[in-house]
Image: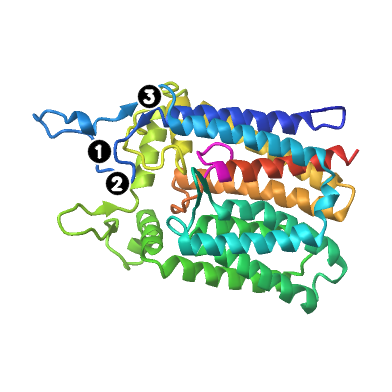
């Protein structure tokens, strides 16, 4: 593993800091494991006994020093580091080939289709003890495809013979992701838009693409009931519909089977705000958070930023945000200084897709956007997301080392 004067030490340090930060927070968030992870928590913790009753020891949280999930995340981190260094050592120009651009896209589409047919919740493929989320692996594929396609056709970018095939390809890829993972599809669409605008796409085409994308997103949101209820809950609590006298003040709740309580679809964000508020400036201390004890759903996944806020406070959240801003600074600087068009768009796409996803995730946690089910890159639990992100960082490092 050779590093030299060409290595971007600032970017590499930021990536390693994110990796360490994420492993630490996954360790903390999974130290207390609720007994029934798939049931939605009630206003009380899932294991809480009624007043005056004796708690059931079988429903008590499982308390472990290092959880199985934390160990798995550490193993995925080792794999991710190896892949990052592999892509860093390889010349990024080798990715500028139809086999990577179109073959990778075809493979991603095949895996997404397979996950929809036989996967868990249409999202995951189970390969023995290993679970793979094809929508996460589709992100580096998208970045490579965009860079290859635009670099090849930059002089005829605004012609119909360029726009129609790329629109069909992007529509297929993001549509296949959107079926089960709207959040990732939204990030991919935004990334494609950012790269095309940077490449010089005319605004008349930008407006058309934005209108089509907005229409498809609205259909994807409002056809499935659970997505519609999440968005309506978010809008209702902003008071927009009440101001227009189009909706009652109370938040909607998902329908529940007979004999079970309804669940508030805005429950995740309410609990995340409680976690952030209780953390204050400096937090309650690492491993000492309360909301992860079954109150906050997806504490180690999509809402791990709330655990950061509770345990490390505003200071910890600010440090985490600062690291992502450093990555944006180094990545955007690299996109401007790359020696060729392919490297320029590759660096822009890789930087944008990581940082934009982080901003969207944080926005959801602080209730600036409706719940989307999107992990925080490098911080949330999940091997597919971690590996896909570290591959992108390896590509960035490769571009940097061949730009000077």
Q: Earlier in the sequence, mark 1 or mark 2?
A: 2
Q: Few, some or many C-alpha atoms within 10 Å of disc 2 (few <14, some 14-19, many ≥20)?
A: few
Against 157, is 359 above or below? above
CA gap between label 2 and label 3 equals 21 Å
Give the quarter of the figure containing the N terminus: top right
Q: Secondary structure at mark 1?
A: loop
Quadrant of res 238? bottom left
- Queried whether the magenta region covers residue 380, the answer comes back as yes
Q: Earlier in the sequence, mark 2 or mark 3?
A: 2
Q: Few, some or many C-alpha atoms within 10 Å of disc 1 (few <14, some 14-19, many ≥20)?
A: many
CA gap between label 1 and label 2 equals 9 Å
User: Are the residues flagged by discs 1 and 2 in contact, CB closer than 8 Å?
Assistant: yes
Indicate left or right for 211 with 250 as reference: right
* Residue at the disc numbered 2: 39
Q: Point out the residue furthest to the bottom here.
A: 160
> Whole-percent x and y of residue 60?
25, 30
Q: Main secondary structure of the magenta part?
A: loop
Q: Which residues are magenta?
A: 375-384
- Queried whether the magenta region covers residue 132, the answer comes back as no
User: Are the residues flagged by discs 3 and 1 in contact, CB closer than 8 Å?
Assistant: no
* Residue at the disc numbered 1: 46
* Residue at the disc numbered 3: 64
> Whole-percent x and y of residue 147?
78, 57
Q: Is residue 394 visible to the viewer in this orientation of the structure?
A: yes
Indicate left or right for 243 with 340 as reference: left
């Amino acid at each position: 593993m050779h590093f030299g004067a060409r290595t971007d030490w600032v970017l590499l340090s930021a990536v390693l800091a994110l990796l360490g930060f994420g492993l630490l927070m996954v360790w903390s968030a999974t130290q207390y494991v609720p007994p029934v992870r798939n049931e939605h928590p009630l206003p009380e913790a899932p294991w809480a006994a009624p007043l005056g009753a004796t708690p059931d020891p079988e429903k008590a949280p499982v308390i472990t020093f290092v959880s199985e999930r934390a160990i798995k995340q550490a193993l995925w981190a080792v794999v991710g580091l190896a892949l990052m260094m592999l892509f860093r050592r390889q010349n990024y120009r080798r990715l500028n080939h139809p086999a990577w651009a179109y073959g990778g896209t075809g493979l991603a589409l095949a895996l997404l289709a397979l996950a929809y047919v036989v996967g868990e919740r249409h999202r995951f493929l189970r390969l023995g003890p290993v679970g793979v989320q094809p929508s996460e692996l589709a992100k580096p594929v998208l970045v490579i495809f965009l860079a290859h396609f635009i670099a090849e056709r930059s002089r005829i970018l605004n012609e119909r013979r360029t726009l129609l095939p790329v629109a069909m390809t992007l529509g297929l890829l993001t549509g296949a992701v959107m079926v089960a993972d709207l959040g990732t599809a939204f990030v991919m669409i935004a990334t494609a838009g950012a790269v095309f605008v940077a490449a010089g796409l005319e605004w008349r085409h930008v407006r058309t693409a934005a209108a089509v994308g907005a229409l498809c997103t609205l259909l994807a949101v409002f056809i499935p009931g659970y997505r519609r209820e999440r968005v309506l809950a978010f809008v209702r609590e902003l008071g927009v519909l009440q101001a227009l006298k189009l909706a009652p003040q109370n938040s909607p709740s998902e329908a529940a089977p007979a004999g079970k309580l309804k669940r508030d679809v805005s429950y995740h964000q309410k609990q995340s705000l409680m976690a952030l508020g209780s953390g204050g400036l400096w937090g309650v201390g690492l491993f000492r958070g309360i909301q992860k004890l079954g109150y906050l759903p997806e504490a180690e996944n999509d809402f791990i930023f709330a655990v950061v806020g509770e345990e490390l406070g505003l200071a910890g959240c600010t440090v985490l945000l600062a690291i992502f801003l450093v990555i944006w600074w180094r990545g955007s600087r690299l996109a401007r200084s790359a020696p060729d068009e392919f490297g320029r768009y590759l660096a822009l796409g890789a930087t944008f897709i990581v940082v934009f996803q982080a901003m969207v995730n944080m926005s959801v946690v602080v209730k600036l956007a409706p719940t989307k089910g999107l992990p925080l890159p490098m911080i949330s639990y999940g091997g597919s997301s971690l590996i896909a992100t570290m591959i992108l960082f390896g590509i960035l490092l490769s571009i940097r080392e061949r730009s000077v």
